[in-house]
Amino acid sequence: MKVKVEDISPRGLSLDYLEEVGELNSTLTRSDPLAAQLPDRLRVTCTLSKVRRLVRLSGALQGTIEHACARCLRRFQIPLELAFQLSLQPADEGPHDGHAVELAPDDFEFGTYRDDEVDITAMVCEQVMLVLPYRALCREGCRGLCPTCGADLNEGACGCVAPQTGGKFVSLRGLKVNR
Ligand SMILES: [Zn+2]
Ligand SMILES: [Zn+2]
């Protein structure tokens, strides 16, 4: 979704739509095959207003994130809800123009837009990436997989003898992840 700055009326412009997530999902899996995915489209609600060429964007995202647990690899879903506030100035005015800083309330993040268009999709992707945890766990204290037989230890002990050396443990776990 892109909005032309000239289409933002003096009273502002409100949007409420479902954002496609296919591209975001492939960006996420490109760097990590076990990366989080969005199983459904994201609901985006936002309001745009402008002061001269400065655009303010207040928005919220609602959806679902599907993670792969960093320990047991089980996929699980959690709700995604976040709000963001951005103050955007034209990229060609340079970052130290001063306008944006003077006019934006304290709690706004700064950004830019190009070609007189605000790329809402790009902002949405950025906001989602910002909230993704580096490691997600399906539950607190997830027991993970047995490094020897691969059994999910949350479902009970598998009967293997616990490995004695840390090095062996790590390399076997690596094989499991890459299977
Ligand atoms: Zn887990
Ligand atoms: Zn085992």
Image: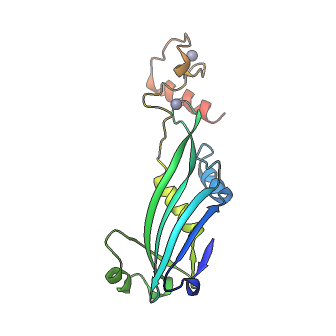
Left or right, 90 with reference to 107:
right
Counting every numbered tag in the picture gives: 0
Residue at 62 percent across and 58 percent down: it is 24
Q: Is residue 112 above or below residue 174?
A: below
**What x and y, as percent, mark residue 40?**
65, 51
Residue at 43 percent across and 85 percent down: it is 94
Q: Residue furthest bottom?
A: 52
Residue at 51 percent across and 26 percent down: it is 144
- Quarter of image, res 105: bottom left
Q: Is residue 91 above or below residue 31?
A: below
For the C terminus, give its image quadrant. top right
Residue at 56 percent across and 62 percent down: it is 44
**What x and y, as percent, mark residue 1?**
63, 70
Left or right, 107 with reference to 55:
left
Q: Nearer the viewer, residue 35 or 66?
A: 66
**What x and y, as percent, mark residue 52?**
44, 89
**Colour setting:** rainbow
Q: Nearer the viewer, residue 153 or 100?
A: 100
Q: Nearer the viewer, residue 107 or 169?
A: 107
**What x and y, as percent, mark residue 86?**
44, 71
Q: Nearer the viewer, residue 178 or 164?
A: 178
